[in-house]
Amino acid sequence: MALQSRTCQTAACTKRVPAGLAGYGVCLSHYLDDAFTRVAKTIELCKKGQAIDSATLDWLIEQGDFAVRMLSRKDPGEPLEQRAKMLELLLCLANAQEYIRHHSISKST
């Protein structure tokens, strides 16, 4: 049985991996960077008129749930900057969901 790493697996990063991200093996900063990139790519696909698959929609919802769970934790060691980025992620996810919903409605009419 392999031991789980407690530090980020991204090159040269030594930050700790929060319990909620153990499956990803990355710290919160790298996870957020990836999430922002994926949300932006999803919106770009939608702008190009491409359909958004159900797996991507499920991922967007999961990210919102994850952000809420992370924000509800009482971790005094978590920098305020990280909490602000989590709130920004929630806003981006809400905007993406609204954009996708609006785009879906306009294509169906």
Image (tube, rainbow, N blue to C red):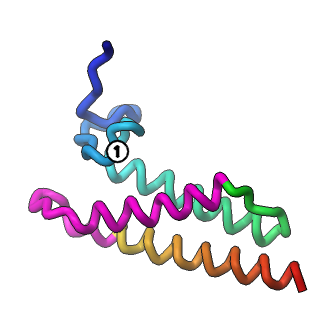
At x 14% / y 59%, what residue is drawn?
75
Q: Is residue 51 left or right of residue 34?
A: right
Query: For residue 2, what is the image quadrant?
Result: top left
- What amino acid type is highlighted by mark number 1? Leu
Is 60 magenta? The answer is yes
Q: Quadrant of the C terminus?
A: bottom right
Position above or below: 35 against 100 = above
Is 17 magenta? The answer is no
Q: Please tell me which residue lies in front, 19 or 25.
A: 19
Q: Please tell me which residue lies in front, 56 or 5.
A: 56
Classed neighbour count for the residue bearing mark 1: other residues with Cα under 10 Å, few (<14), some (14–19), many (≥20): some
Residue on which the image places disc 1: 21
Position above or below: 68 against 1 = below
At x 80% / y 63%, what residue is drawn?
51
At x 73% / y 56%, what residue is drawn?
53
What residue range appears in magenta?
A: 55-84
Residue farthest right in this picture: 109
Q: Residue 62's spot in the image, x, y percent?
A: 48, 58
